[in-house]
Every structure is written in structure tokens, then in C-alpha cells.
Image (cartoon, grey):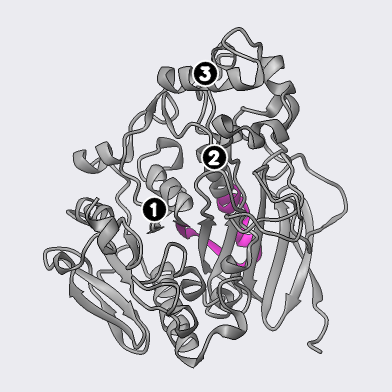
């Protein structure tokens, strides 16, 4: 049996936290980064966490944010979540090298189509990152209609931020928590990468042009999340909400108290409401990232972006790399091409959506996608790929290349229009123009 973890205590602004230290890695679970967004704080910007007295235990994950789950608590949903959820869900999971000092930080935003998932899932285990000298902060953020929802009664409350975009606000609150507290864990608040996959990558895309996020991060990573559609007009979003509320017997005349009295279970179980209503354009979120990229007004930080060969979206990733790296900080484009031997019968057109996660985190043994089925080739590639991701987290913001995987030099997309291809034997550079958007049926759409 492995040795029992040793308690480790860290003081943050709100009080003391007790986590576990084992094998050179300190792990803290269930760290609150904002007050519970419940009752009158539902559909409000995140509020500060009240200070606590004594030592708060941080060794277990708190419940995921409300989302549709299987009635059988042993069966995960499509976002990997099973069992209980709670609106009180704004928590972090943190993996840090023991006795770290000045360590780079990655703040991870999970995927799940904006209405599923949690930061505490095994695919996002930051143990390998910590052993490589990087702190990983996995974030829960509000989902579905708790995250993206606007209504005349809420607009009448006159919040300066406007209505909607609560997941974006949560991401900013998590970054502010990192700015204020990460040094206590040995992290460098001046070297923070925001990163995410799928919906989390979409949030990172949004943060590239969000004024409230400026200065809170120094690099950005977008995995299968280059969502370049325009944000939604706030009035249009409100009209869609009012229409959907008719399915539960409410409408435009509902008061803010009426809306906040609707149970979380009702919001996540009603098909027209469960997914939320996407980002809205307002005072808080004045312009969509695609418009900022075209105008050259996005936050000028190094960007890594890419997709998997068995999914669509590489064309959008290439657009992001082109526009984000056209001047100033570089952009690095990738495509993940490896299909594990045990998935050959299923993934006949290449690795599917989310397949890269257990490789970019080197989390094969904690991910539900891997475990004992993985072979030596999978494990060797995971070690190489994760080394490239941590090299990006570590590199200075003015670096012009990523050096990783035992001598591989990952050049910027730049004028050469090259991408790093992660195949079974490891990464290699290739012309991006030769790579299709995805498998045939996706690329032809």
C-alpha cells in the first residue's frame, strides 16, 4: 500500500487550508474562490469568500455545479459527472510541487458544452504537472442557465455588469484568487496560463477579449474550443429565456424572486433551459473575441491552440493561430493524431473530442478514458505531450519557441504556417494547410 498522505497547511487571504502531501505533490481540494452563488446571489457576479477561523480541511472535492445526471449515481453523464451536485459549487482543486517557489501556474477550465462537467475529474489530475514543476488550478464554474441567463426582472436590478456571462465572471474571480493567493502555494502570479478544452476552451477564447481579465494571465491555451461565433445580443438572449420559461409556467412578468425560487433541478432538467443561452454582449463583455482578433485588440499573449484529428474545428484553430499570432506574441498550432491501440475499433477516423486530455495531462491512470488498457506507446506519448504543455506553461511570455519532448522544437505558426502533429512516435512539424478541418464527414460540412 502507498504511504498515507501527510497533512500540509497553507495560509490564504481568507484563512488556513489543510491539504494532503504525497510523493512530492501537495493537493488541495474544495478550495472556495467565491461565495456560494445561491439565494439572492444566483445570477449575480461572484462575491468574495468570507474569512473563516481555524483550519479548513481541503482534502475532498465539493459537489459539481448543477447539471443533468443519470438517476443511477454510479453512471456518469456525458461530462463525466455522477452523483450529487450543488449550486454551492465555486471551488478549486490545486496540485502544487511540494516546497515550490516561483512555480508557473495553469488555471484549467473544464469542458462540457457549457452545461456539464467539473474541474475535479480525473482527466484533469495535475500530479504530473506538479512533478514537472507546474501548479495546476482546476476550476468549477457555473453551468447552463445558472451561467448564461438574462431576463427583464434581472436587468431591472441594475447590476453594473449587466446580466448573463456568469461563467466568465467566475473564471475572472478564479484568476483573481490566483493572483492574490498563489504565492502561498509557491506559485508565480506573474506567470499564469489560462487553459481549457471544449467549452473551457471557449471560455478561454472569450477571456482573450474580456476587459475584466486583462493582466490576470500571461499565456492562453485553447484545446478544441476555438468558438469564433459572435456573442449573443442581450435583448435576443432575454427573449429566448422568456420563451423557454414558458415550459415551466413562467414568462416575462416573472419577478426576480420568482426566478430565484425555481429549483436548480428544474433548470437543469428542462430541455429548453438546461444548456443556458451563451455569452451575451453587454457592458461587462463589450465585444466578441472574433471581432477583437480581426481588429488586433485582443490581449496580446502567447496562444497555443489546436484540435484532434477525429473531430472538426481545425480550421477555426488555424484562424485563431493566424489572427492571434499575426503580430506581437506568437501562436502555436497543434493537431493530436494518436489513436490508442485499445481504441482502434472505435476511433476509425482519428482521435475523437476529448481524446487528448489524458495525454496533455499525462493522466492516463486517473482518467476514465485510459487506465490499464493503455500500452507502453500511449504512456510514452503522454510523457512527451505533457512535457510540451508544461514547457508552454513555463516559458517566458516573450519566447519564440517551445522546447520539449527530448529535443523537439515547436516553432510558432507564423509565416511558415506550421503545426505540431502529435502522432504515436511523438511530435513533428508539418504544413498546416495540408491538414483538413476534421474527418471527412465533418470537413465536408
The residue carrying mark 1 is 225
Which tag is nearer the camera, tag 2 or tag 3? 3
Which mark's residue is nearer the viewer, 2 or 1? 1
* Left or right: where 237 falls relative to 327: right
Q: Earlier in the sequence, mark 1 or mark 3?
A: 1
What are the residue bounds of the magenta stretch?
177-196
- Counting from the top left corner in percent of width and height, residue 83 is at 75, 53
Q: Dots 2 and 3: beta carbons under 8 Å? A: no
Residue at the spot x=58%, y=41% of the render? 143
Q: Is residue 218 above or below residue 411?
A: above
Residue drawn where x is 75% and y is 53% of the image: 62
Residue 414 relative to residue 123: left or right = left
Q: Residue at label 3?
A: 243
**Residue placed under numbered mark 2 in the picture:** 167
Q: Does residue 391 belong to the magenta stretch?
A: no
Q: Who's the residue at 53% across and 34% down the image?
A: 276
303 left or right of 376?
Answer: left
For marks 2 and 1, the one nearer the N-term is 2
Q: Residue furthest bottom?
A: 376
| 10 Å crowding of disc 3: few (<14), some (14-19), many (20+) | some
Disc 2 element:
helix
Task: Name the element at disc 1.
Answer: loop
- Between 160 and 349, the residue placed more toward the observer is 349
Whether residue 184 appears in magenta in the rendering, the answer is yes
**Quarter of the figure with residue 224:** bottom left
Amino acid at each position: 500500500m502507498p504511504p498515507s498522505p501527510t497533512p500540509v497547511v497553507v495560509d490564504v487571504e481568507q484563512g488556513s487550508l489543510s491539504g494532503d502531501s504525497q510523493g512530492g505533490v501537495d493537493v488541495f481540494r474544495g478550495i472556495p474562490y467565491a461565495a456560494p452563488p445561491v439565494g439572492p446571489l444566483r445570477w449575480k457576479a461572484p462575491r468574495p469568500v468570507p474569512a473563516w477561523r481555524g483550519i479548513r480541511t481541503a482534502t475532498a472535492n465539493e459537489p459539481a455545479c448543477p447539471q443533468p445526471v443519470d438517476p443511477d449515481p454510479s453512471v456518469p453523464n456525458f461530462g463525466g459527472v455522477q452523483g450529487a451536485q450543488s449550486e454551492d459549487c465555486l471551488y478549486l482543486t490545486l496540485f502544487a510541487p511540494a516546497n515550490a517557489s516561483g512555480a508557473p501556474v495553469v488555471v484549467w477550465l473544464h469542458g462540457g458544452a457549457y452545461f456539464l462537467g467539473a474541474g475535479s475529474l480525473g482527466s484533469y489530475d495535475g500530479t504530473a504537472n506538479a512533478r514537472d514543476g507546474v501548479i495546476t488550478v482546476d476550476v468549477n464554474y457555473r453551468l447552463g442557465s445558472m451561467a448564461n441567463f438574462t431576463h427583464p426582472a434581472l436587468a431591472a436590478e441594475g447590476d453594473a455588469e449587466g446580466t448573463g456571462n456568469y461563467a466568465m465572471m467566475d473564471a475572472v474571480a478564479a484568476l483573481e484568487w490566483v493572483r492574490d493567493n498563489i504565492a502561498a502555494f509557491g506559485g508565480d502570479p506573474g506567470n499564469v496560463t489560462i487553459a481549457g478544452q471544449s467549452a473551457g476552451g471557449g471560455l478561454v477564447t472569450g477571456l482573450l477579449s474580456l476587459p475584466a481579465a486583462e493582466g490576470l494571465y500571461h499565456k492562453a491555451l485553447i484545446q478544441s474550443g476555438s468558438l469564433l461565433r459572435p456573442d449573443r445580443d442581450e435583448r435576443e438572449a432575454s427573449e429566448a429565456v422568456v420563451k423557454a420559461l414558458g415550459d415551466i409556467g413562467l414568462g416575462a412578468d416573472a419577478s426576480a424572486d420568482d426566478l430565484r425560487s425555481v429549483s436548480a433541478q428544474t433548470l437543469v432538467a428542462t430541455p429548453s433551459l438546461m444548456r443556458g443561452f451563451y455569452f451575451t454582449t453587454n457592458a461587462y463583455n463589450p465585444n466578441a473575441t472574433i471581432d477583437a482578433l480581426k481588429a488586433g485588440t485582443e490581449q496580446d499573449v502567447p496562444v497555443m491552440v489546436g484540435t484532434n484529428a477525429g473531430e472538426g474545428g481545425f480550421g477555426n484553430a488555424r484562424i485563431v493561430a493566424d489572427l492571434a499570432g499575426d503580430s506581437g506574441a506568437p501562436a502555436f498550432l497543434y493537431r493530436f493524431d494518436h489513436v490508442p491501440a485499445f481504441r482502434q475499433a472505435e476511433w476509425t477516423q482519428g482521435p475523437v473530442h476529448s481524446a487528448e486530455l489524458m495525454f496533455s495531462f499525462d493522466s492516463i491512470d486517473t482518467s476514465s478514458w485510459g487506465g490499464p488498457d493503455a500500452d507502453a506507446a500511449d504512456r510514452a506519448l503522454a510523457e512527451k505531450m505533457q512535457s510540451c504543455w508544461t514547457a508552454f506553461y513555463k516559458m517566458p511570455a516573450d519566447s519564440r519557441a517551445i522546447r520539449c519532448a527530448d529535443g523537439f522544437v515547436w516553432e510558432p505558426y507564423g509565416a511558415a504556417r506550421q503545426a505540431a502533429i502529435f502522432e504515436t512516435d511523438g511530435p513533428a512539424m508539418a504544413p498546416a494547410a495540408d491538414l483538413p478541418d476534421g474527418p471527412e464527414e465533418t470537413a465536408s460540412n
